[in-house]
Image: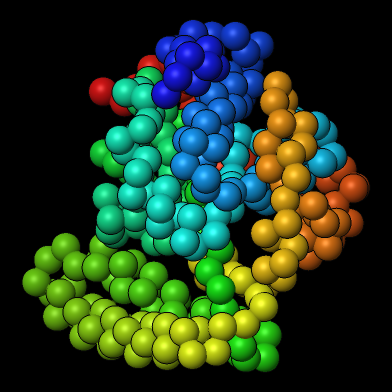
Amino acid sequence: MGADPIVSMNAQDGNKTGESILRSCQLVQLRILHVLDSICKENNIQYCLAYGSLLGAIRHGGFIPWDDDLDVWMQEDDYRHFIKIARAQLPDDIMLHTPDMTPRVAFRFSKLRDKNSFMLELGQGMSVNDPSGIWIDIFPLEVCPRLPPKIITLLSQCVLSPWFRTKWIVNKITNPVNALLYAPIALVCRLVSLLFGAVWIISKTALPGKYEIVLDALGGRRLFDKDKMTNLKRWKFEDGEFPVPSDYEPILKLIYGDWRKIPPPEQRPRHAKIIDPIHAAQ
């Protein structure tokens, strides 16, 4: 990884510098971001800050003060390249968590996790037996078919939702009675997912369009202009500069509406149920 002290330092050294558990969590995530940035630079992989991390960079120059999450976007080709090479280039105390490692959990993106900490996520069916270190999320941006936006959104949700439902149903099959009840429903949902998935792949291959969609746990609810997502610049975020879309205004408006307005405390979401920045799961 080279001699960059931020990349090569032991994660627990950084964990102990925060004045609170939340800040310690953010510092671990920041260190993971530096590692990701280093790998992407070395391998000519394009990525940028996403969601609340993008908002935090523009509005706060770093983390949103109450945020316990860090997100990045990657173009789908870059995402596949990163997944292919990351494990060989990550330091020993950071792991790549891909969807196939937790097949019952409904997400279509990957995470980089710190091995020397513990963070239990709200929702998505994660348990203490799954990879559980503090993480950052890596969301692939997938090119959409050249179809009307409403049809793209509907089609993408049909691709995802039945598959998510299948995973939820499989979790219910804990005894023979439940299996008889839920297995046929799971089979139908899986077939629907495969059908719409085939339509999606064929149509986007034959008619690639100008929009991209994030295939995440939300089921692809927003369309992003590809030109805006690939034209990037470096922007201050905490102790470094990281890529953001050059024309970030319409992206933030699409996601957050009046993004300059600070929300009241009751509208400040958290992603973690438990955070322990200095102890891994036993």
Color style of the picture? rainbow
Q: Position of residue 62 (x, y in %)?
A: 74, 31
Q: Position of residue 252 (x, y in %)?
A: 79, 56
Q: Position of residue 96 (x, y in %)?
A: 36, 40
Q: Position of residue 56 (x, y in %)?
A: 76, 39
In this view, 73 is above or below 177: above
Q: Nearer the viewer, residue 209 or 269?
A: 209
Q: Residue at point 56% right, 73% down?
A: 143
Q: Residue at point 12% right, 66% down?
A: 175
Q: Tell me, yes or no, if residue 89 can be seen here.
A: yes
Q: Nearer the viewer, residue 264 or 241?
A: 241
Residue 115 figure quarter: top left
Q: Tell me, yes or no, if residue 36 can be seen here.
A: no
Q: Residue at point 66% right, 11% down?
A: 19
In this view, 125 is above or below 207: above
Which residue lies most toward the left here? 176
Q: Is residue 273 left or right of residue 85?
A: right
Q: Quadrant of the C terminus?
A: top left
Q: Nearer the viewer, residue 177 or 116?
A: 116
Q: Residue at point 73% right, 57% down?
A: 231
Residue 64 figure quarter: top right
Q: Is residue 17 left or right of residue 185?
A: right
Q: Quadrant of the N terminus?
A: top left
In this view, 161 is above or below 150: above
User: Count the marks: how many?
Assistant: 0
Q: Is residue 185 left or right of residue 90?
A: left
Q: Nearer the viewer, residue 199 or 63?
A: 199
